[in-house]
Every structure is written in structure tokens, then in C-alpha cells.
Image (tube, helix red, strand yellow):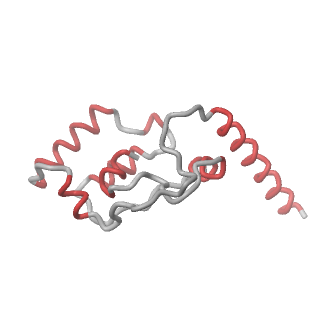
Amino acid sequence: MIMWEFMTGRRPFWDRNHDTYLIIDIIDGLRPPIVTYAPEGFTELMIECWDSNPDKRPTADDIYSRICEMYRKEGLNSPTKIIESSDIGPVQKNNPGAIYKSRPLSAMINSAMSLRSLRSRSINLEKVK
């Protein structure tokens, strides 16, 4: 998510409430939109970082070395060059329900998992009918 914010100048999910429904959507694979302009390899690395399986994500050392290599290849000296080229651009106002501060999420995650489970059961019951 940090790479996406770096590329776009926006915080992830700035337009949504940060609630149990967002948690469910993220568990189900929701990710921010991919930007069309990025240095070669950047988008691929970002997608690798978003893998739902933590074992498949690159290490911090790998991310650092790959980004350094991208900067070297692109001849970039400043991260602002990437943001200025972004086709998404910075946001003027966040959704009031988008909360960007550290807070305990265990209760919200448990609630999201319960709600997700209920939704799955409901869908399965409809298929049986």
C-alpha cells in the first residue's frame, strides 16, 4: 500500500469508510486501482507485495534492492517525479469514514469474518433452492 500511495499521492481506500465491509472486500481481494504509468517493474513489485499469502510477498531487502535498481534504470533522482507522472493524482478530501491512525482492529476483523461467513452461508443456501 505504501508503494501505491507513493505512486498516486493518495492514501489507499481514501474514498471508502474504513469499516467491516472494507475489511471483507480486502480479504476477498480488493486492491486499489493499478496506475498506468510506473517505472518498469514497479507495478509488478507492488502486486507481489499485495499477495494474500504472506509467504509469497517479497522481503523488505528485496523490495529495497529492486526499487534502487528501478531508480537506476529510469535515471530518477527524486520520488516526486513518479508522483507528478501519476494518472490518479492527489485527493483533495478523504471520506470522513476513512481513518488513518493506529487503532485496534481485532473486533472489526472478527466482525468482518462473521459477516463474511454469514454471507457465504446465505449464498450457499440460495444455490440449494
Image-quadrant location for residue 112? top right
**Location of residue 123 in the rendering, given as x and y in whole percent from the top left corner:** 79, 58
In the image, taking residue 6 as reference, residue 113 lies left or right, namely right
Q: Residue at x 77, y 53 (%)?
A: 119
**Location of residue 5 in the rendering, given as x and y in whole percent from the top left corner:** 36, 51
In the image, taking residue 50 as reference, residue 46 lies left or right, namely left
**Location of residue 128 in the rendering, given as x and y in whole percent from the top left corner:** 87, 60
Q: With respect to residue 94, does 45 lie above or below?
A: above
Q: Residue at x 43, y 61 (%)?
A: 33
The residue closer to the viewer here, 97 or 117, is 97
In the rendered image, the residue lying farthest to the right is: 129
Q: Residue at x 9, y 53 (%)?
A: 75
**Which quadrant holds the C terminus?**
bottom right
**Location of residue 89 in the rendering, given as x and y in whole percent from the top left corner:** 33, 63
Tag count in the figure?
A: 0
Q: Residue at x 50, y 34 (%)?
A: 102
The residue closer to the viewer here, 9 or 23, is 9
